[in-house]
Amino acid sequence: MKMVFNKAMIWWIILILIVFGPLLFLLGFGISDDLSLVGHLAPNFWTDLGYNLSRPGHLSRPIYGLIQTTTLHLFKEHYIFYNVVRISLWFAIVFQARKVFYSYFKGSSIWIFLFFMSLPVFSTAHLFNFFQMGYLLSLLFYLLALGYLKDIDGGFTRKKHVHFVLFGLLAMLSCEIVFPLFIFPIAYNYKGNLKEVLYSKLLRWSILIFVIYFVYKFLIGPIYQNESDI
């Protein structure tokens, strides 16, 4: 088994180097608004950050806005650095997904999972457009949140709820697209037993995440929203 694992790891690394190695140096800016953001970069970081956090499109995604503005001012037009960050971010997601879901696979099937995770044929727009990385950040933080709940039997019963709430909030504040995914650990734990779901602590902690997020988005955010972009 160890020999099979080592061979699979070697082939996986070779495949990743073949696919992503050239992209690191040849992949330029994406087809989204990447060049527009680089071309309209303000001289002052805090001015850009304030604008990014207050415009309607990013109002509910402050983590995304912070990282986007920071990388813009650090890397400017040097696209290779953006490539390093986004590919590293994607493989952080692959690593954490393997850690969370490893117990659901038997034998070599984990490598099938890693193969499809490593080559994101259904999500290339988010990987190859750097300034859409809010989607990737939200997925990474969500997987980190799940990692704190995952037990050795494959369920989500560990009591590290504070960490779950913290990373769950980071996920929502990066991009709220992960909202429906919070149902997964609850549904997995209780297998449709409605009574147990209603009395579960995990449901209460998940509701707390949503309450904090909605208070921020609908009560706090509008206070400093930039109306000029509406």
Image (tube, rainbow, N blue to C red):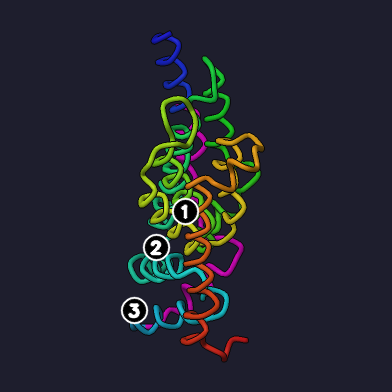
**Marks 3/2: CA distance?**
17 Å
x, y percent for residue 131: 51, 63
| Residue 130 seen | no
Disc 3 residue type (three-letter):
Phe
Using the image, tell me which numbered label, if any, was put on residue 171.
none
Marks 3 and 2: CB-CB under 8 Å? no
Q: Earlier in the sequence, mark 3 or mark 2?
A: 3
Using the image, tell me which numbered label, if any, was put on residue 78.
2
**Marks 1/3: CA distance?**
36 Å
**Residue 5 position by quadrant:** top left
**Residue 47 position by quadrant:** bottom left
Q: Earlier in the sequence, mark 1 or mark 2?
A: 2
x, y percent for residue 125: 61, 54
- Disc 1 designates what residue? 205
Name the one closer to the observer, 207 or 125. Answer: 207
| Residue 185 seen | yes
Q: Earlier in the sequence, mark 1 or mark 3?
A: 3
Disc 2 residue type (three-letter):
His
Mark 3: few, some, or many residues within 10 Å (few <14, many ≥20)?
Answer: some
x, y percent for residue 227: 56, 90
Vertical arrangement, residue 25 with respect to residue 35, above or below: above
Q: Residue at x 45, y 52 (%)?
A: 86
Mark 1: few, some, or many residues within 10 Å (few <14, many ≥20)?
Answer: some
Q: Which residues are magenta?
A: 14-42
Marks 1 and 2: CB-CB under 8 Å? no
Disc 1 residue type (three-letter):
Trp
- Disc 3 designates what residue? 45
Marks 1 and 3: CB-CB under 8 Å? no
Q: Residue at x 42, y 45 (%)?
A: 144
Q: Residue at x 56, y 79 (%)?
A: 56
